[in-house]
Image (cartoon, helix red, strand yellow):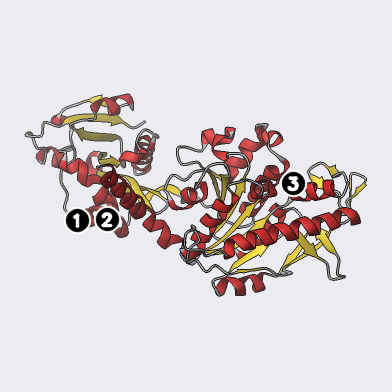
Amino acid sequence: MEHEQGGKEFVAALRGAASYVHAHHGRTFVIAFPGETCARGEFDQLLCDIALLSSLGVKLVLVHGARPQIDAELAIRGLVPTYEGDLRITDDAAMGAVKAAVGALRMDIEAVLSSSLANTPMGGARIKVVGGTWVMARPVGVRNGVDHLLTGQVRKVDIESIREVLATERIALLSPVGYSPTGEAFNLRNADVAEAVAIGLRADKLVFVLESDPSTWSIARSAGDAGHLLLGEAERSLAVQPLMEHLSPEDRNCVRAGLAAGRSGVKRVHLVGAGTDGALLRELYTRDGAGLMLYADTDYEATRQATIEDVAGIQALIRPLENAGVLVPRSREQLELDIDTFSVLVRDGTVIACHALIEYPDEAAAEFACVAVHPQYRGGRRARSLLTRAEAIARRRGLERLFVLTTATSHWFVEHGFVQGGPEDLPTPRRAAYDARRNSHVLVKTLS
């Protein structure tokens, strides 16, 4: 019995992920992870999950950090790391440690991604990883009176060469090192590299895998059950909350780079904690994710006028309520005829709530009808959002009353300003169509 239940759960999960598999196929994701994440014992599992993304058709650019690895290499050489704020000061001796640490870590990453043993998660993957001198850099120079020497900042990225790699279904791997036209190498912050690459590629997503868990951050409390925030909301929240000062330097840099990328055209920036097994896959292939998403576009979860393409989604949403006798059954043909009266709340392309607004302009009234919210998304004020939209539309069109017929949710409407009425309060055409056998409650709200 347990085996059968597990099989059903697997099938349900796979079917649930199908729309994301289709949506992400052929898309370009830039995924960045700091050196602290690379040092974790479960880092190989993260790389296996990344390899799975490649197998599912995602075009991948990976950018790794190496801060703790560089510090460890400095210690081996008897040198002390030197920082000015969050930036390392890199002299010639420190640059030698940077090259050694980055080179060793890069080889380890390539080795795991290239593995294809049959008894491992990478079995049969045949992943190809490519790197290059794609990042041009210049020195940070003197800041606050301190010369940062061979610490650099991104000057330019060879985007076309990276595109050529992605076009051949290979993973592009970038390290936090850049080069100058004069032949110097500079130590860079991996978050800066990821930001520049994502902007240059016009990446579909920029993902940062962080040491801390973004779903527990204070700003996540205003992100709803799915952990998504408009970019502007995130910036305003971070401006008044002391979150950033409590994060590690690497995580701070990633948040800063993510905000900058969002302002420069990267529509979705995902922040995912490294400590949760499978968090990257859950964030990208489940509707509610496993981290924090900052989005620059306004249509990730948006209420809008329904179109004919929404009919199937509306029908799937209201059918259970029709079967339960809560809503009057509507055929697909009727839905298509009435689609202009519907508004939908769409989440990542899926209709999760709907309502119809049926107008009776001769009597300055409208019916708030066919209200449905997907069971997974109830309790999040979405029905209230639909009602607010309906009221705004009705007022804009000069209507004075909103009414509803319901057999099961009278109390909710009373809580939102409706008062008990009767069939006599309905507009004449609606009164003629009133079905006394259903004995629906009539509730009315006057629009001020």
Give me the residue at 69% from left, 60% from top: 106
Residue 68: give its label: 3
Using a 10 Å C-alpha cutoff, classify the residue at mark 1 as few (fewer than 14 neighbours), some (14 to 19) or many (20 or more): few
Give me the residue at 32% from left, 24% from top: 415
Position of residue 20 measured from the top left corner of the image (x, y, whole percent):
42, 57
Q: How far apart are the two marked residues, 3 and 2, measured between alpha carbons?
A: 54 Å
Q: Mark 2 belongs to which amino acid?
A: Val
Q: Are marks 1 and 3 in contact (CB under 8 Å)?
A: no
Q: Mark 1 belongs to which amino acid?
A: Arg
Q: How far apart are the two marked residues, 1 and 3, measured between alpha carbons?
A: 60 Å
Q: Is residue 196 visible?
A: no
Using a 10 Å C-alpha cutoff, classify the residue at mark 3 as few (fewer than 14 neighbours), some (14 to 19) or many (20 or more): some
Q: Nearer the viewer, mark 3 or mark 2?
A: 3
Give me the residue at 30% from left, 30% from top: 446
Under circle 2, the secondary element is helix
Residue under numbered circle 1: 332
Q: Mark 3 belongs to which amino acid?
A: Pro
Under circle 3, the secondary element is helix
Position of residue 199 measured from the top left corner of the image (x, y, whole percent):
64, 60
Residue under numbered circle 2: 311
Pick the front one: 162 or 204: 162
